[in-house]
Image: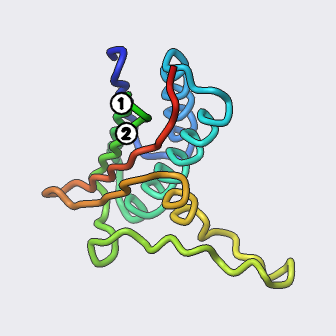
Amino acid sequence: MTDTQINVSFQAREDAVRDAIDRLMTQLRPWGLDSDMAGTVELVIAEALNNVVEHAYANTSPPCPVHVACERQAGGVSIRIVDEGAEMPDGQLPMGLAPDVDVDLMDLPEGGFGWFLIRDLAQDVEYRRAGAQNVLNLRLDLALS
């Protein structure tokens, strides 16, 4: 790790996602994120990593590697997530539309908020398939000290 870059790798399991996020957030502390900024970074990374585990590696046997790189930049943090799971449907990111919540309590959707949150909180969200890997790049505009 340098002052400007943090790298974390793990095997795609639900319990490993929480540990990876904890390690990332601990290593991000010296970057001067206030609690709101840290919460935003954590939420975006958690949503993206949970999608990798739940969808990209849904029908895959271990090992299922995931690599996360966070880079400190002027005006924020860029994040790259790389996995070897299934390609996004049609090779495209989901639209990230907010689910309809104007329904009875029992009819509220259980999921569907992840890509909406990622697209709402992050900038320059880009996905590409590079050989056998999914590469997700995004940037968070943050005032770092």
Mark 1: give few (<14), some (14-19) or many (20+) Cα within 10 Å. Answer: some
Residue that numbered label 2 is attached to: 78
Quadrant in the rendering for residue 109 = bottom right
Placement of 8 over or under 107, stated as above or below: above
Q: Residue furthest left?
A: 131
- Residue visible at 42% across and 34% down in the picture: 75
Q: Amino acid at mark 1?
A: Gln
For mark 2, give the secondary structure.
strand
Foreground: 39 or 19?
39
- Residue visible at 50% across and 70% down in the picture: 96
For mark 1, give the secondary structure.
strand
Count numbered badges in the picture: 2
Foreground: 14 or 36?
36
Residue 13, horizontal then vertical, whole percent? 49, 46
Q: Is the Cβ of the residue at disc 1 closer than 8 Å to that at disc 2?
A: yes
Placement of 94 over or under 48, stated as above or below: below
Query: From the viewer's perspective, is 11 left or right of 110?
Result: left
Marks 1 and 2 sit apart, C-alpha to C-alpha, by 7 Å
Quadrant in the rendering for residue 71 = top left
Please say which color scheme the image uses. Answer: rainbow
Q: Amino acid at mark 2?
A: Ser
- Residue visible at 21% across and 61% down in the picture: 129
Query: From the viewer's perspective, is 104 left or right of 81?
Result: right
Label ID, residue 73:
1
Foreground: 54 or 88?
88
